[in-house]
Image: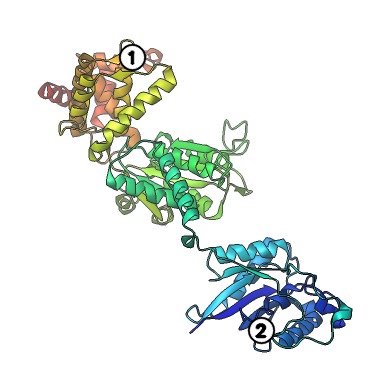
Amino acid sequence: MDKKNIVFGFLGNVLDQRGKGRKRWTRWRPTIDICNHPEWPVYRLELIYHTQDSKLLEDIIQDIKTIAPDTQVNPIPVQIQDPWDFEEVYTCLLDIAKNYTFNNEQENYYLNITTGTHVMQICWFLLAESRFYPARLLQPSPPAKPLASPENLAAEPIANQPLYPSGQINIIDLNLNRYDQILTRFQQYANQATELLKSGIATKNRHYNQLINEIEQVASRSHAPILLCGPTGAGKSFLARQIYRLKLNQHQITGQFVEINCATLSSDNAMSTLFGHIKGAYTGASLGRNGLLRQADNGVLFLDEIGELGLDEQAILLKAIEEKQFYPLGADKLVSSNFQLIAGTNKDLKQAIIRGTFREDLYARINLWSYQLPGLAERKEDIEPNIDFELARFAQEYGTMPRFNQQSRGRYIQFATSAMATWPGNFRELTASITRMATLSIQGNITLEQVENEIRRLQIHWQQTTLSDALIPAEIDEFDRYQLEKVIEVCRKSRTLSEAGRYLFAVSRAQKQRTNDADRLKKYLAKFDLSWEQIKDSTSKGN
């Protein structure tokens, strides 16, 4: 059984109103012409009209009954105050769709884009493309031959026997799956976008490639927050920048990329840094400050280590994400910023919620699109292409292209992909390793000896890192962790507690009348249940 043709369209108060008496049949009227094709019968015409055009509606319905008595005309009155207002027109047509019962099994739907303002035509396109109307676009056009002149008209038209040639009916299907060539071009464009996210690195890890493919789709189609999880150095910041570049290339945003590591924000300045402040908001605030959220207006805000934000900052951030408005510190007037948030974390935010250090409602808001980035040790098949990427980046920055010879490259890759290579610093550590060898290379040649030296350097560093991890408490803020790691490193290199203290307190000790660096350092270590003896003992065992 053939499906019935159902056409939606506006009554054209210009194109459909073309004279009176028999003269009207000598003018092309698009709404009439749609029903003037016996080979393509319209079962029902959903005719949208402005209430002030009731008389024209009656005339058009009568003429349709004359030439196509089997066509049902269903008038749909609307009151659109401004037919050039996108919001008003779109809302009106969307409401019609929501209240309409579509029967795709028995009916084919079409949207007449010839009548109405350009805004109305664009809204038809958007509603068809988004499938609010499961329809194709219909565009009638006048016949190639001229219409009859009034003196040649013998009588009124007879049903299914029009007095003049029918016009052309052009059907536009927005389902791109039917157009292989267009679909192929879109696929090529998507591939280019994916390559942008990977910065052209020929990654081989299947899980990572699948993850990047989905991120490309989300970044291209959504403005919702994105949460990037993964260990330090796994590439969260790098990927966030690439997402920004993708959105910029697709003209989704016009603003800048604004980045901050929340672990570096102290409780005293976090509010001002993120949300800004007005002049006089606190002692010393002689000038106002916009803050990072306003700086990221129409751009991307990347909050790395978002789990380190205080609860007060989290509450304001949640409001800013949902309403795009917030109060700067000390202000009584809301400011606006339309930013897209990308958040990064190396912590388990669910555990942070249980501990009461992270808001559950904020987590729910930023967790719509959440991605766990694998560490370098989980992507060892991607080490070799990343080596080439780092060498090219070094060449671009320093103007010299460093190269391995076959033997030195093979040795480094063998070690880097072995079980011995743990890469606790992930891609950041690989970047540092390649940079060191490239810098020390003689005339751009990375020799086997340099590779062996770099391997020993990495092994020693990893051993020390493992020992430090054994000393540092598991439940510790990233701010304290970074500081404590440095203190342990200095203690390991120092011969005595006093020597380590003199190095660590070199500036503040000069301002004190009495210096007791050893005691200050001893008390600092005690805060973390550590002692000088523990650190030196772990160092000797490691050696």
Mark 2 near mark 1, Cβ–Cβ under 8 Å?
A: no
Q: Position of residue 492 (x, y in %)?
A: 20, 20
Inspect this view and state whether residue 372 appears. no
Q: Is residue 23 above or below residue 88?
A: below
Outermost residue to the top: 442
Inspect this view and state whether residue 303 appears. yes
Pointer 1 residue: 444
Q: Is residue 433 above or below residue 47?
A: above
Judged left or right of residue 148, residue 121 is left
Pointer 2 residue: 74
Please, what is the three-letter code of the amino acid marked with disc 1?
Gly
Outermost residue to the left: 541
Q: Nearer the viewer, residue 69 or 307?
A: 69
Q: Position of residue 458 (x, y in %)?
A: 22, 24
Judged left or right of residue 334, residue 408 is left
Determine the CA span between mark 2 and mark 1: 78 Å
Q: Which color scheme does this rendered protein use?
A: rainbow
Q: Position of residue 91 (x, y in %)?
A: 63, 68
Crowdedness of circle 1 by 10 Å Cα count: few (<14), some, many (20+)? some
